[in-house]
Each structure stands twice: as structure tokens, then as C-alpha cells.
Amino acid sequence: MAIDLVLRRDWNARAPRGDYTQLDSTKGVKVHYTGGRVDPGIVSDHAQCVAMVRSIQGYHMDGNGWIDIGYTYVTCPHRKVFEGRGLHHLPAANGPGLNAGHYAVLGLVGNAGLVQPTDGILHAILDAIQYVRDHGRAGKEIKGHRDGYATDCPGDPLYAWVKRGAPRPGNSGPTAPPFPGRLLKYPPVIQGEDVRTWQAQMSTRGWELDVDGAYGSASREVCLRFQRQQGQDDDGIVGPITWRLAWEAPIG
């Protein structure tokens, strides 16, 4: 499916207050979320998506003092891609010193209300990524805003998808078993079949550890190293995200 691009004139964007800085090429894309509450009603009402994009532009220009909306593109649940700053223009959303490295693509999900990215949003993000690769000299990297910058953005659900390799919805792949419901951490030593299941999966991934059902110092060390490899907070605790990544993150 070709990109469903909503041009600036179509969402009544304000004109930028100055000239953009030229961006010849990037290493790839940084994925973002709004960081606030997103009304779940946008899933069934595209007019709310348009209003939200205009609100974000207003906040960036009037609140942050930027010349325009900070994102290269914004994506919504209806698989539409709103033109922000557009191709070959330096974004403002990645953080000081980081904007020249990646284009910035926002998915309209937040930390409350609509938290889980819909298939339409994920498809639209990937449509935008392919577009900047084809027309904006973007490299292959797909990273979260939190990669290299101290922020919760793009939120745990969207970031976990990024760390799984940003697959197209509907693509088959390994799926993690349900999270056991308790955090696996040390000290003290925690024992159980949930520990054994996680250890066995980590062993399958190539990590050296005993599959003994006891989460002790050795398991914690493997967890720490795995979390660092995946760009997660390295707390040595197997929580829902670390558990899911053990099965769903690409190997290698």
C-alpha cells in the first residue's frame, strides 16, 4: 500500500516562522509518542486526529518557541501520515545534538487513554519510514526517542515493538508466552517454573546459564546484559517487557 500522505495544506498547518535547516541524509528514524493522554475516540474519528496534530504544532510553536511542529511526520490510527517538517528538514523533537542523526516520526499514542499502538498506527509509521528511505536519504536505523536521550518516549508498548525490529502487523513471528505475573529478581533467590521457562529461552538465544529454575546472581547477570543489548533499563529484573523480548526480539 502506498503512503496515505496528508499534506500540510490538508491539515491546515500554520506556516513555519523561519527557515528549516537543511538535512541531506540521516542514519534512520526515531519513533515518538505524545507523552500525554490521547483520547481513544481518535480511533473512530479522524477529525480528532487532525485537531490533535494542529494542537501539537501549536504547542511546539507557542509553548516551545520552535519554528514549527518538531516532527518530520505524524501518524494516526487510520494509517494516514501527516506531513510535519517533511523531507530534508532538520526535526526538533529528538533532543539537542540528536536531530541531525534521524528523522522524527510520531505515533498518536500516549501514556494514558490510547496507550497501545493500533495496527493502523504501526503500518503508518512503517509507511513513513519507507517514504523517508525512498525519498529522504534515510538509513536503515529504527530507534526510539529514548535511545540516546533521557525520556520515556515512545512509551513501553511502542518501544517494545521497535526493539522487536518494528515488524509489520500481521507478520508471523515468535510470540512470548504470557507473563507469569511476578517479577523475577535477585536477591533473594526466586525459584519456580517461570524462572526455568525464562532461563531455557535465554539458553536457546545463546546465553550461558544453568536452567535450574533458580533466579540467582548468574541469572541476574544474564538479564542485565540482555537488557543492555536490547536498549532497556538495566535493572536485572525480568518484568513484562524483558520477558517478552526474550522471545520476540531479533537474535543477533
Image (cartoon, grey):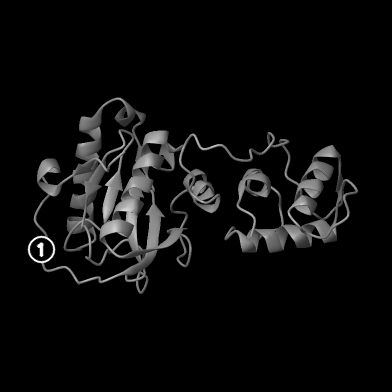
Q: Residues within 10 Å of mark 1 (few under 14, many from 20)?
A: few
Q: What is the tally of numbered marks visible in this picture?
A: 1
In the picture, the quarter occupied by the C terminus is bottom right
Residue 148: x and y in percent read: 47, 67
Choose between 43 and 163: the one closer to the eye. Answer: 163
Q: Which residue is mark 1?
A: 17
**Can the viewer see residue 90 in this picture?**
yes
Taking the spot 47% from the left edge, 46% from the top edge, the residue there is 158
Image-based side of 58 in relation to 212, left or right: left
- Kindly give the residue lying farthest to the right in the view shown: 212
Choose between 245 and 39: the one closer to the eye. Answer: 245
**Can the viewer see residue 185 in this picture?**
no
Residue 74: x and y in percent read: 28, 47
Choose between 21 and 152: the one closer to the eye. Answer: 21
Taking the spot 25% from the left edge, 70% from the top edge, the residue there is 23
Taking the spot 36% from the left edge, 30% from the top edge, the residue there is 40
Taking the spot 21% from the left edge, 44% from the top edge, the residue there is 5
Please identify the quarter of the rendering in which residue 174 is found: top right
Q: Amino acid at mark 1?
A: Arg
Residue 162: x and y in percent read: 49, 51
Q: Is residue 109 above or below residue 154?
A: above
- Kindly give the residue lying farthest to the bottom in the view shown: 97
Disc 1 is placed on an element classified as: loop
Image-based side of 187 in relation to 143, left or right: right
In the picture, the quarter occupied by the N terminus is top left
Residue 233: x and y in percent read: 60, 59
Choose between 180 and 251: the one closer to the eye. Answer: 251
Please identify the quarter of the rendering in which residue 70 is found: bottom left
- Kindly give the residue lying farthest to the top in the view shown: 44
